[in-house]
Amino acid sequence: MVQKIESPPEPPVTLSDPAELLTGYLDFYRDAVLRKLEGMSDQELRHSRLPSGWTPLGLLKHLAYVELRWLRWGFSGEPVEEPWGDVEVRGEPWHLEPAESFDDVKAFFRQQCARSRHIVAGARMEDRAATLGGRVPAEEDRPTLIWILFHLFQEYARHVGHLDIARELADGTVGE
């Protein structure tokens, strides 16, 4: 029997401010990631059903580090000790420590999303990133905040689709 995840409504159809619409959809997708993972067993969260080897819990950790890299490390220029903490070896599936639980990774993800919201609230869409991967490139090579947010939006949309498939394969649950 197919189970269905019910989702909250998308941002209001009357929104006309691009920044509000973009940040509203980012939050919608951030919530979608957690909705798709809630209720999965620890075994399924750590199990890959794909040749690439990524796991649902590894994907959640990856998205937390995406927030950290793009908004804290890149846009704000904050010093970050481990900006690539989701990968052990480039090109390999996202890395999880054996002791990392769903609750631990979810709390880290929520912290990064909250920090991202704070950063965005204090900036203008046309502001440029302070750094790019920890280095300070020429002004024209630093992305604007709106570019970064669109990049995050497309990354979330793609990965939520991946989680749709992983969840359905895991236990038959479908939904938004």
Image: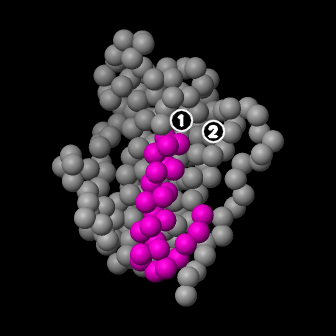
Q: Looking at the image, which residue sits at the far bottom?
A: 1
Task: Name the image quarter holding the N terminus.
Answer: bottom right
Query: Vertically, is 120 above or below 33?
Result: above
Residue 135: mark in rendering? none
Name the spot of residue 72 as percent of width and height, x first: 44, 35
Which stretch did the figure color magenta? 152-176
Residue at 35% of width from left, 78% of height from top? 43
Q: Residue at x 66, y 64 (%)?
A: 7
Q: Which kind of residue does numbered mark 1 sit on? A: Leu
Q: Count residues near mark 2 (Cα–Cα under 10 Å), then give few for <14, some for 14-19, many for 20+.
A: some
- Pick the front one: 91 or 84: 91
Q: Is residue 61 visible?
A: yes
98 horizontally vs 119: left or right: left
99 or 66, nearer to the observer: 66
Image location of residue 154, percent across then percent down: 49, 43
**Badge 1 vs badge 2, beta-carbon distance below 8 Å:** yes
Q: Residue at x 43, y 60 (%)?
A: 162
Q: Is residue 61 above or below residue 17?
A: below
The secondary structure that dominates the magenta segment is helix
The C terminus - image quarter: bottom right
The verdict on residue 154 being magenta is yes
Mark 1–mark 2 distance (CA, rounded to whole Å): 7 Å
Q: Quadrant of residue 58?
A: bottom left
Taking the magenta stretch, the answer to whether it contains residue 65 is no
Identify the residue under disc 1.
149
Q: Which mark is residue 22?
A: 2
Q: Give how far across and how far down residue 88 sits, in percent.
A: 21, 51
Q: Is residue 88 above or below residue 19?
A: below
